[in-house]
Every structure is written in C-alpha cells, then in structure tokens.
Amino acid sequence: MRFVARLLSMILLVFAVIAGLVDAIQSVAAGQPVLTPLMDTWSSNSPGTLAQVQGLFATYLPAWVWDSGALWILAQPAFAVFLVLSLIFYLAGHRRARPAGRFAA
C-alpha cells in the first residue's frame, strides 16, 4: 500500500510541475501572473471525465457537496491542488523512522 501511495504522490507531483510550468509560461507571455483553475485545465483536457465525475457527485452525494465543496476545489489553481494531493499521498506512504531502543548504539 505504501508503494501505491508513493507512486500516486510522484505522479501528482509531476502533474503539479507541468501545471506550474504552463502557468509560468503563460505568465511570462501575458506580463502578469496567470493561475489556471483546475476546472479550466480539466475541461480543456478531458471534458468527458469531468462530466462523469459531476454525474457521480449528482447521483451519489447531496447537491451541496458539489456546489460548495467540489466547485471550490475546482476553482483553485491546478498546480496547488496537485501539490496538496501529492503531499497527502506522500504522507500516507511515508515510512516512519524506528525509534532507537534502550540498547541502541
């Protein structure tokens, strides 16, 4: 399970770097900071899956979850959402150091 969490963390970190690079390039071209929301990134790359996720939310969860929770997350910059998810999966897959025993050298 740790391997899967670490792998997902790495993949999400790659997505965050790519999204950050795209925003940096657009910022340089525009001459001002540009932060692309996750909703715009997702709808431009895969609108079908966005519609499927919205349908799943509408089918299995109350409407307020989509309106207040999911739309707020989708309005955040894509790189930030991917960074937070990457951190969560990294922490889930992190191996803690063993505490030194009584007779540790």
Image (cartoon, rainbow, N blue to C red):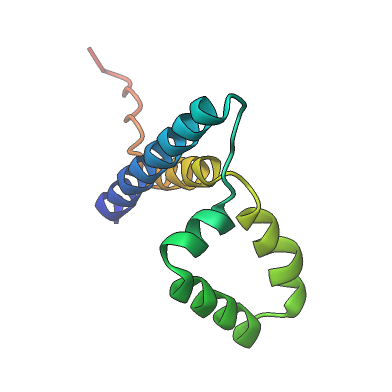
Residue pictured at 77% horizontal, 73% vertical: 64
Q: Where is residue 102 in the image (x, y as percent from the top left)?
A: 33, 20
Q: Position of residue 89 (x, y in %)?
A: 41, 48
Residue pictured at 56% horizontal, 30% vertical: 30
Above or below residue 46? Residue 63 is below
Question: Can you say which quadrant of the picture contains the C terminus?
Answer: top left
Which residue is more in the foreground, 105 or 34? 34
Above or below residue 3? Residue 31 is above
Residue pictured at 31% horizontal, 43% vertical: 10
For the image, the number of numbered tags is 0
Which residue is more in the foreground, 34 or 64? 34
Q: Where is residue 78 in the image (x, y as percent from the top left)?
A: 52, 46
Q: Position of residue 90 (x, y in %)?
A: 39, 42
Q: In this view, does 43 lie to the left or right of 60?
A: left
Question: Can you say which quadrant of the picture contains the N terminus?
Answer: bottom left
Above or below residue 7? Residue 22 is above
Which residue is more in the foreground, 78 or 25? 25
Q: Is residue 26 left or right of residue 34?
A: left
Residue pictured at 36% horizontal, 34% vertical: 96
The furthest residue to the left:
105
The furthest residue to the top:
105
Q: Is residue 70 left or right of residue 40?
A: right
